[in-house]
Image (cartoon, grey):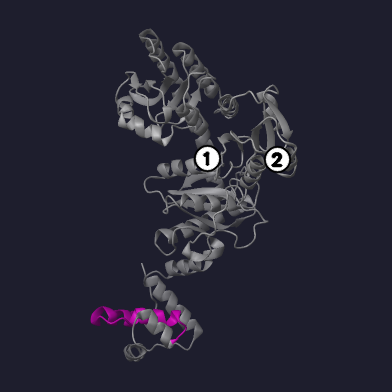
Amino acid sequence: MTDFVESLGPGLFRLVAAGRDTQVYDVVLAEPGEAAGRPGEIVLGAGVTDPAEAVALLERADAAGATGVVLKAPIAPEVAEAADRLAPALVELQRETSWTHVIWLVRAAIDRAHAPPGESGDDLFALADAAAEIADAPVTLEDARSRVLAYSGLQDSTDPARVSTIVGRRVPPQVIAHLRACGVFRRLARSSDPVLVPGGPDGMLPRLVIPVRAGGEWLGSIWVVARTPIPPDRVERLTDLATVVALHLLRLRAETGVARRASADQLRAALRDGTPPVPAQPPWRVVALGGETGDVRRRLDLWEAITHRFGWHRPLITDLDDTLFAVVTDPPSRPRGSHGTHGPQGTHGPQGSHGSHGDAGSMPWLDDVLTRVRIHNPALHAVAGGVARTSADLPRSRSEAAELAGLMASGRLAPGFILLDDAWDAVIVERARKAIGTNLPGGPIPALQSHDMEHGTAFLPTLAAWLDHYGDTKGTAQALDVHPNTLRHRLRRMAEVTTVDLTSPRTRLALRLQLAALVR
């Protein structure tokens, strides 16, 4: 954090408390009533002037695991004292500096520091600056999914939509809705002609949009804040620049794809045979991630977006055998049963503030993330294999996660966040069920099954319920929704059809496993 503040310039910032020594990935504005940041984020306390409010913001940031808090000068002594006992760094901003200036400055420093490998990331920022110079207006470069790739430096002619776009690194939903209503995306996807977008919600100024295409494929767009109309000759120069941007977007896509494939291939090999190293400290668990329909590529995009959103910026995620797996750390200090789900019911515990449940990429962190995202998409789920203390243990943990994923897909486990520790019994029964298959080597089950099929009786469900309730007549009758006398009559009839010896524990176990094997 010290190096980050020094790189931004002591003329604007002063480090009051160094805080935790973590890397900075993002900057966010403090919102009343919401979690103050996440791990790796700097929280801007815009509008926070009262010392009590400042201390409260620091405490919220500490609970959320944020890296630092920025407040305007002068910082009261009690605020500085509170910062000394809390984990987030405290940075003082010069009183006359605008928060918009801080957003541009910090966001540019972060994005340039985390630009993709090679020169393409820096080149895109340079191209955004070149486009802004041509248009004499602020510019963002976006991909075809409205994600911000680069933007020009500070300029006065801007609006809240541009601020939100750069802070969130994607176009806000209300602006997306306005653009769709105007048919902007449809025109961008079909044509190379510039598009003029009228002003929109929340004070959004008009935009001039230049499509970026290569070989007929729409790769992205140049967005210009057009407070005043852009002269035709400058529009033409921007159109020419779009061909250069297209080459860089193709190059960036290739660089990102190569790096992503190399990382995914290494992780895939570790999950298969446990030999390549994993860039995280053990112990680990292999987690199968699910919930999204469609091909594995779509599921991978969804989960990478979720992990990035919640602070895991280099997620260890890959696909193997059409299943999406992640390798997460499992801190030894985690108390047994602290995860939000226990057993096959998939119910979550109380929701806490983000960051209070562990570092990004850990089991407690994933538990917290699933609790949050399942509010909006209950189909999302994760299942974790056993603890892997060495790389050699990863294939076993991956196999266990795959078994749990199969149980959840078949409906034998309810969607949620489930550990092998909490569903080991279901795994054991499933392994036995698969080993038995449909080959029933003997015993009373084949005769009872034939009688059910020929006469419409319910001997097999009755026997299963009786075994599940340890021979308790009342409990078995309630489970079957029949009178106890009806149950006794069925048991006598079963004994007339075939010999059923229920006095032997081994026989009862074998019967129950055979009955489980018949359920498909």
Name the amino acid, label 2.
Answer: Arg
Q: Nearer the viewer, mark 1 or mark 2?
A: 2
**With 421 as the anchor, is 495 left or right in this view?**
left
Vertical relation: 89 (above or below) 511: above
Residue name at image x 60 percent, y 57 percent = 387
| Percent coordinates x, y for residue 175 in the rendering | 39, 32
Asked whether disc 1 touches disc 2, contact meaning CB atoms under 8 Å apart, the reply is no
Say if the magenta span includes residue 299: no
Give whichever of 173, 471 is nearer the camera. Answer: 173
User: Are there few (<14), some (14-19), or many (20+) residues within 10 Å of tag 1?
Assistant: few
Q: Quadrant of residue 146?
A: top left
Q: Main secondary structure of the magenta part?
A: helix
Q: Outermost residue toward the front?
A: 50
Vertical relation: 8 (above or below) 519: above
Residue name at image x 37 percent, y 24 percent = 199
Name the amino acid, label 1.
Answer: His
Q: Which residue is mark 1?
A: 308
Q: Is residue 442 visible?
A: no
Mark closer to the chain start, 1 or 2? 2
Q: Which residue is mark 2?
A: 20
Which region of the structure is painted magenta? 445-472
